[in-house]
Image: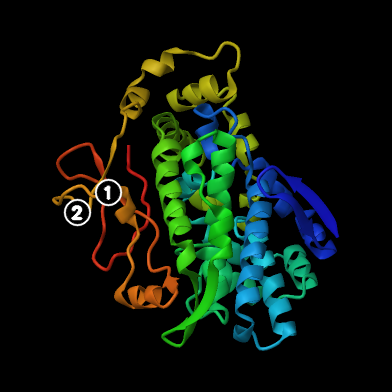
Amino acid sequence: MKRIFDPVHHFIELSTPEVQLLDLPVMQRLRRLRQLGLAYLAFPSAEHSRFTHALGALAMGTRAFDELFHHGEEFFTSAVDAAYQRRLVRASLLLHDIGHGPFSHSCEEVLGIRHEARTTDLLALPELAGAVAALDVDVRDVLGLILGDPHSRYPALRELVSGPNLDADRMDYLQRDAYFTGVATGRFDAEQLVASLRLYQRSEKTVVGIDRRGVVALESFVMARYMMFASVYFHHTTRMFEHVLHDMLRELWPNPRALDPIEEFLQWDDLRVLNALDGAPSVAARALRSESMRLPGSSTASATSPTLRRAKRRWTYVLASRTSGPTRKLSSCIVFHSESAKSARSGSVALAATSLTLVRHPTSSRNLVEEPSGGSYSFAAPRI
């Protein structure tokens, strides 16, 4: 057993097989991938990595699972089954981000492959497959949770790992990103939210919900996510340099398919991309070199280039129910379906939809939070 101290979750305990998994190069590579990409240019303390986030997601997922088991032992066939599911959710959360490339989602836009899609190839690597087997879990179950397979044998665990509503991934990154950026509005009542988690049957499926005492905590979770997108993830400085980064990565990788082989993909991380800026003559490379590395002799003329001028437009965010409808209060972000309303009166609430969608207004530069038909919400980044 190993104990790791974390500034967000304090002590995180790991078993010996989990430590051996973390020691693999494919896992240590996550130390060289910033969690928030170029956000450190706007928030200087946002230097935390995907590695620490993986540990934090494991911590949150373990707490959530233990709470679900404590209040719903009848949903597990035996103590052996519960122990297996606990190991499974911990392994899945440790591995859920291994498919990320340099600067995370910026890399995905250039290469055209989402990080979850690379997970299948990564888990097929003999070294990683052996480490997962040493955890005494089935790699197919791990893959099903990470990819959000609707046919997974463990639908409740799938929600904890890959959402789409209340998962340990979001519960950690909101707290971690708020901590390291210093954005107080990104915090939520994690203790109350986890303590309110429950399992229940819905349409012959086991799903994750909350009891009625957790509704306010759930609202704080949704609002924290909205505020982090508005304040951090869509910050104008971050968005500006992400646009420039896209141009630079397209120059660096003129043939994105060259990185399809998983061995070649694993050779790339944030540090290698930043090293590639040295000596690159393009406007995008000069701009990033000037700001992200602060190298002596970096040209400042690039700041007035058309690329940066175009990218420096600021974005405002307005919450609305429809692009043509009236503005709603922020508290209306949470929508419960009729079945959930009935269960709320009996003491539990289904997590029908707890995220938001940012869409471009067709006639203005504003972005609206739109509620699609059916009441389901999800985030989409605006294009600069």
Instruction: Look at 50% across and 80% down and name the residue there.
Output: 200
Q: Secondary structure at mark 2?
A: loop
Mark 1 is surrounded, within 10 Å at the Cα level, by few (under 14), some (14 to 19) or many (20 or more) other residues, namely few
Instruction: Look at 47% across and 77% down and name the residue there.
Output: 150
For badge 1, the amino acid type reads Lys
Give the number of the disc on residue 329: 1
For badge 2, the amino acid type reads Arg
Which percent across, then down, holds residue 124?
67, 68
Inspect this view and state whether residue 297 appears.
yes
| Label 1 or label 2, whichever comes before in sequence order | 2
Q: Looking at this rendering, what residue extends furthest in the top direction? A: 297
Front-most of residues 112 and 318: 318
Q: Is residue 160 above or below residue 205?
A: above
Which percent across, then down, holds residue 231?
42, 36
Front-most of residues 166 and 195: 195
Which percent across, then down, holds residue 83?
73, 77
The image quarter in which residue 94 lies: bottom right
Badge 2 is on which residue?
Answer: 322
Q: Is residue 176 left or right of residue 28?
A: left
